[in-house]
Amino acid sequence: MTTVLLNLLNAGIIPSSGWGVILAMALFYGGITQIIAGILEFKNGNTFGTIAFCSYGSFWLSLVALRVFPALGWAVAVDSTSMGAYFVMWGIFSIFMFICTLKLKRGLQVVFISLVVLFFLLATADFTGIGVIKTIAGLEGIFCGASAIYVASAEVLNEIYKKTVLPL
């Protein structure tokens, strides 16, 4: 849900005044909740789940810091080149995670390859300053977030009903 919200802003569908909603979701749902989920996956012996949830939870917390620290006077605002480098690093990490999904369900493959594309589109938008690339990234990010919502819904529904309600 956090990915969808951020990318509604990137696509220009919601105004920049939506940052308050995005930061709240990023801090509590995208960040803290995912890190808790990662810790629980560690307890379950799921290395992929641990790395994915803890890492992307940290992504959201760091994104909040990148927006909030300058507003609090704790850091200067991040320049577009540095932000592009940030997204490139997350794109590289996501390539690694996508490769891991090749042994997992197809739905996770869709989520992670769309995440790779999203991070590199965001990096390109920051490096070039071309607004239409950020809009395209936003639209692709909405797809990425929606696919993650679908996978999460399918996993929960399929487990509860003990049958395939939504295919993965």
Image: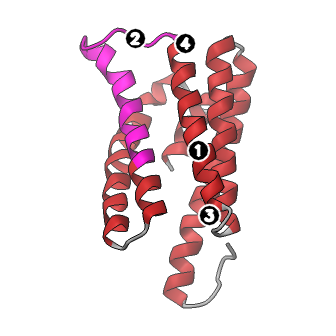
> Badges 2 and 3: C-beta atoms under 8 Å apart?
no
Occupied quadrant, residue 70: top left
- Above or below, 165 against 46 in this view is below
Would residue 143 be visible to someone looking at this image? no
Where residue 6 sits: x, y (%)?
53, 36
Which comes before the other along the chain, label 4 or label 3? 4
Q: Nearer the viewer, mark 4 or mark 3?
A: 4
Occupied quadrant, residue 38: bottom left
Q: Nearer the viewer, mark 1 or mark 3?
A: 1
Which comes before the other along the chain, label 2 or label 3? 2
| Residue displayed at 30% across by 70% down | 43
- Above or below, 45 against 80 in this view is below
The disc placed on residue 94 is: 1
The disc placed on residue 77 is: 2
Mark 1: secondary structure: helix
Question: Does the magenta segment cover residue 71?
Answer: yes
The disc placed on residue 80 is: 4
Residues at marks 4 and 3, CA–CA distance in whole angstroms: 32 Å
Amino acid type of disc 4? Ser
Question: Does the magenta segment cover residue 10?
Answer: no
> Badges 2 and 4: C-beta atoms under 8 Å apart?
no
Amino acid type of disc 1? Ser
Magenta part of the protein: which range?
Answer: 55-80
Mark 4: secondary structure: helix
Mark 3: secondary structure: helix
Where residue 158 sits: x, y (%)?
57, 82
Q: Is residue 137 left or right of residue 72?
A: right
Residues at marks 2 and 3, CA–CA distance in whole angstroms: 35 Å
Residues at marks 2 and 1, CA–CA distance in whole angstroms: 25 Å
Residues at marks 1 and 4, CA–CA distance in whole angstroms: 21 Å
The disc placed on residue 150 is: 3
Q: Is residue 77 left or right of residue 152?
A: left
